Image (spheres, grey):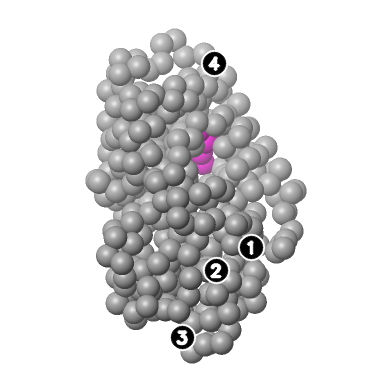
Amino acid sequence: MTLLPTLRLASAVIVVIFAASAQAQIESPKSYPSTPIRLIVGFTPGGGTDVIARLLGQKMAEEFGQPVVVENKVGAGGIISMEFVAKSKPDGYTLVMAPSSVITVNPIMYRKLPYSSTGDFVPISTAATFPLFLVINASAPIHSMKELVGYIKANPSKANYGGSSGLFQLVLELFKLTTGTRVEFIPYKGGNSEAMRNVMAGNILMSVSDATPVIPALKTGKVRALATTAAARLASLPDIPTMRESGFSDLEFQGWFGLFAPAGTPLPVVRRLEQEMKRALNLPDVRQRLGALHLTPGGNTSEEFAARIATELARWAAIAKAAKIEPAN
């Protein structure tokens, strides 16, 4: 079913803004890059965003002949790093690797942000995409998405889900809107890792998460993955059906990690970075490493990336409104 309007006008306006950012300066740089590049990451070393930044940063450095230095500016769920880059000189020497949540979800979940997703950055390219998984406690008498809906309707007092507010909450709110079910949200300060531990312990019925906490939990046998939001079954997890296969096409979704520069970065620099991302993401060792992390290599154009962002901003805004989610101050 089609849940909400696509908000095409809003999407078109956002794309125009992104395009204008890229076109703002068109002078051809003499020899970019001629000095080291700072690649900012708003999350801790060893996390998904950091691993991808270091993997691609190394390949970029080898190609450019200049160091690409990854700097972790951790805090506020990536907000600090985005603010830093938004205020940096738009010359291509300060970039940020960011997950989709800080660009397409934060503007929905926070009333005020120290940066504008659409006004302060020019998108370069997606680095990788990733699906989410809906998991339940393995002792529950549920083996499919349709059985889950039936169970929730028959056992409303046991219907709850846990996780962090933001992307994962929006996906489960979309599930509720799509199925007409009532499911209590239990927020965890420890995010999805804490939520997964509580699913394993039987304290909550279910959660939605990326692969990082899901894969180890599956190996314990204490949780069961009912479906993935990927467009097709994953080669690494072929037994997990997709949401579309399960009859819930509205829940098909891929999160992403992407490279951004400050708004006003010269278009030739944007193109150079875009081309390098595409080259690096086609290297066999990079693709193998990303695959091992259950990630799909990206590599789209700046314009394609901007269009994707516009669509997602409109989608999440509509879902939050329908679910009556109030942004935090």
Prevailing secondary structure of the magenta residues: strand
The quadrant in which residue 93 appears is: top left
Q: Is residue 37 above or below residue 169?
A: above
Read off the magenta span.
120-125
The type of residue carrying mark 3 is Lys
Query: Which residue is drawn at the image coordinates 55% and 68% (left, top)?
Result: 145
Please indicate, yes or no, whether residue 53 appears anywhere in the rendered image: no
Query: What is the number of the mark on residue 27?
Result: 4
The label nearer to you, 2 versus 3, is: 2
Question: Hey, what amino acid is under mark 1?
Answer: Gly
Q: Tell me what residue is drawn at x 72 percent, y 63 percent.
A: 1
Say which of 19 and 3 sits in front: 3
Please report whichever mark, 1 or 4, sits nearer to the chain's N-terminal start: 4
Gap between marks 2 and 3 measured at Cα? 16 Å
- Image marks 1 and 2: residues in contact by CB distance under 8 Å: yes
Q: Quadrant of residue 165?
A: bottom left
Question: What is the x, y in percent for residue 29?
Answer: 47, 14
- Write down the residue under mark 1: 247
Q: Is residue 189 left or right of residue 327?
A: left
Residue 297, horizontal then vertical, whole percent = 45, 35
> For the residue labelled by badge 3, is the local secondary structure a helix, a strand or a loop?
helix
| CA gap, disc 1 and disc 3 | 23 Å
What residue sits 27% from the left and 38% below the top? Answer: 71
- In the picture of the structure, the residue carrying the numbered disc 3 is 158
Q: Secondary structure at mark 1?
A: loop
Residue type, mark 2 in image: Met
Q: Nearer the viewer, residue 145 or 282?
A: 145
In this rendering, which labeled residue sits more in front, label 1 or label 3? 1
Residue at image mark 2:
145
- Residue 78 is marked as none
Distance from Cα at disc 4 to Cα at disc 3: 61 Å
